[in-house]
Image: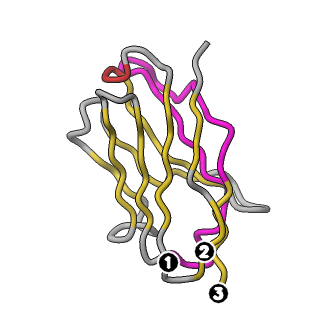
């Protein structure tokens, strides 16, 4: 059974940093594009960042460019999101997701981790 388990969320003041981690049981991990998504109360889920299966290509939402960094460790089956200069509008539940490189959509999702940024 595929499992994606996020950790690292919490409460932080504006301007602070958090590092989210996602432990993935998808195999082989190197064949999966990975993404971080978030959903704030009353809003639709949105993509935050994506990384290609080999880690060579990264995409960031405009709202997080220059502040967030996505990375992928294929040897350890881990996905990370380093979040710096956090803003109150970054408050949301953050999810990691996996998409097999030949698939059209993300079929595997974690349970989410709460990130709260206080002003």
Of callouts 1 and 3, which one flags the residue occurring earlier in the amino acid sequence?
Answer: 1
Residue 56 belongs to magenta span: no
User: Residue sitting at 58 percent across and 69 percent down?
Assistant: 90
Local packing at callout 1 (Cα closer than 10 Å; few below 14, some 14-19, many 20+) is some
CB of mark 1 within 8 Å of CB of mark 2? Answer: yes
Question: Which residue lies at the image location 59% right of the left edge and 81% below the top edge?
Answer: 13
For the record, the magenta segment spans: 86-113
Measure the C-alpha gap from mark 1 to mark 2. Answer: 6 Å
Check the image and name the residue furthest to the bottom.
119
Q: Which residue is mark 3?
A: 119
Q: How is the image coloured?
A: secondary structure
Question: What x and y, as percent, mark residue 76?
Answer: 35, 30
Quick one: label 2, few (<14), some, or many (20+) residues within 10 Å?
A: some
Q: Is residue 106 left or right of residue 71?
A: right
Q: Earlier in the sequence, mark 2 or mark 3?
A: 2
Q: Quadrant of the C terminus?
A: bottom right
Q: Nearer the viewer, mark 1 or mark 3?
A: 1
Circle 1 — which element? Answer: loop
The residue lying toward the viewer, choosing from 98 and 104, is 98
Q: Is residue 27 above or below residue 88?
A: above
19 is higher (above) or lower (below) than 77: below
Q: How many marks?
A: 3
Position of residue 37 measured from the top left corner of the image (x, y, whole percent)? 55, 49
The residue that disc 2 covers is: 12
What residue would you read off at disc 1?
16
């Amino acid at each position: 059974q595929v499992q994606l388990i996020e950790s690292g969320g919490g409460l932080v003041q504006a301007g602070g940093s958090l590092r989210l981690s996602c432990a993935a049981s998808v195999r082989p991990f190197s064949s999966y594009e990975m993404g971080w998504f978030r959903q704030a109360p009353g809003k639709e889920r949105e993509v935050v960042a994506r990384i290609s299966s080999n880690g060579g290509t990264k995409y960031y939402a405009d709202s997080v460019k220059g502040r967030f960094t996505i990375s992928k460790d294929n040897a350890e089956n881990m996905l990370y999101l380093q979040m710096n200069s956090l803003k109150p509008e970054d408050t949301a539940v953050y999810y990691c997701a996996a998409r097999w490189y030949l698939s059209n959509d993300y079929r595997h999702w974690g349970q989410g981790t709460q990130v709260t940024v206080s002003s």
